[in-house]
Image (cartoon, helix red, strand yellow):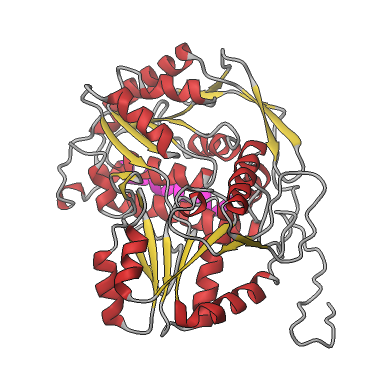
Amino acid sequence: MTTSADPRATFDYAPAPESRAIVDIKPSYGLFINGEFVDGHGKAFKTVNPASEEVLAEIAEADDNDVDLAVKAARRAHRGWSRMPGAERAKYLYRIARIIAERSRELAVLESIDNGKPIRESRDVDVPIVSAHFFYYAGWADKLKYAGYGEQSLGVAAQVIPWNFPLLMLAWKIAPALACGNTVVLKPAETTPLTALLFAEICQQADLPPGVVNIVTGAGGTGQALVGHPDVDKVAFTGSTEVGKAIARTVAGTDKRVTLELGGKAANIVFDDAPLDQAVEGIVNGIFFNQGHVCCAGSRLLVQESVADDVLHRLKRRMATLRVGDPLDKNTDIGAINSAEQLARIRELSAVGDAEGAERWSPPCDLPSHGYWFPPTIFTGVNQAHRIAREEIFGPVLSVLTFRTPAEAVQKANNSPYGLSAGVWTDKGSRILQIANQLRAGVVWANTFNKFDPTSPFGGYKESGYGREGGRHGLEAYLK
């Protein structure tokens, strides 16, 4: 490695690619129903590597009849699974957790190939937390009477997960459902089905009873068939607010239980007494982690006027060190945008920001010639009426606003249809508590951002959905 005489210059890192050899991607995949892989009867589709546009595999699409078979398999399995002593269910969850830990490198590489996120994130964040979720809820399986939500399972859970954290969202949904004695039919996102299908193999490896977990792949039609199935007792969805509203309309008038974890437009508030270098790291992590494909991303930076210029100077200097490129390179900070459709959405809203009069800035950045890429970007001169300050961009784009007083910061932070998360950066513990109590957000991070733990509940207010996942609170959605 070499560096220039300029002390501000970054190291010139040699490529450090993670090997793909540990992953065996099959040419085609079927549906996982009743403990076996079976053919789907819909129109098959392809999943691609967003970093190269390489076709990875052909994926079966489940039609209405396939979904019906999966729900029936889950219903049959529920009779035995729900009556099994909690300590026995826990053994399966512990086994799954251990297998995930043992196969963590394989899962991390596959996630980065199919999703586009940097291997550092899938290896060091996603997969360890996935395993931890199964370990955590295994511990609850024989202690449900102490949780305060009852001990009786609901039945069959229909779970629909997004493409930004495919394996992690699977764990958030499946682990508590199984611990409480429910069975599951899960639909992964159309663009990122591969780790869910590998998880199906892990269920086989763990000798999970057939039908306890079923995985049906497909697009929106498959999800609609699953959510609308009359024999489903519980619907859990993570994704866009638009689809969440459609799901709420579908289940209205039924006795199905529903939890929705939807979009966000989180405010990351930096006061003038904050540790600024630490805050800059939190800003970067808040918006550029996972290419900004994070529902709780800190996509609105609210910085106190007296330090705004200093914070922006430090932020731009830090952004200039971010490395965009091959997700399997261990030096990569920002990987590929997940799909051509999402890239078009990011470009569209960024162009709107330009038209609204905000000032765009990105560091010098050579983007690969193939795949879906967008540079880390900030907009200054943003006001609360701008679309880029109100709509979820779901990409590596940060809107910067300023404030003068704590009251103004709270007013601007809460001026959003969303309410999923927020961040507060200050040296005063009393201010953290004061501001956090006034923010209409489900999660408030203090002097950090984007930190997750299976013991801590997560969820939102307003158009960010309702219900909580994680922690003891995550059991409530799966118990009568």
Query: Is 459 covered by the magenta stretch?
Result: no
Q: Quadrant of the C terminus?
A: top left
Number of callouts: 0
Residue 214, how many percent across, how many down?
45, 28
Q: Is residue 198 left or right of residue 13?
A: left
SS majority, magenta: helix
The image quadrant of residue 344 is top right
Is any atom of residue 157 visible in this view? no
Q: Is residue 422 left or right of residue 251?
A: right
Query: Is 101 covered by the magenta stretch?
Result: yes
Q: Is residue 449 left or right of residue 21?
A: left
Q: Residue at position x 45%, y 39% from top?
A: 240
Q: Residue at position x 14%, y 50% from top?
A: 148
Residue 134, how many percent across, how many down?
40, 50
Rendered position, 471 above or below 331: above
Say which of 67 and 458 sits in front: 458
Q: Quadrant of the N terminus?
A: bottom right
Is any atom of residue 105 visible in this view? yes
Rendered position, 409 above or below 289: below
Residue 5, how many percent across, how many down?
84, 88
Q: Residue at position x 34%, y 44% from top?
A: 463
Q: Residue at position x 25%, y 65% from top?
A: 438
Say which of 295 and 102 sits in front: 295
Residue 165, how many percent across, how many down?
52, 47
Q: What residue range appears in magenta?
A: 89-104
Q: Is residue 119 left or right of residue 95?
A: right
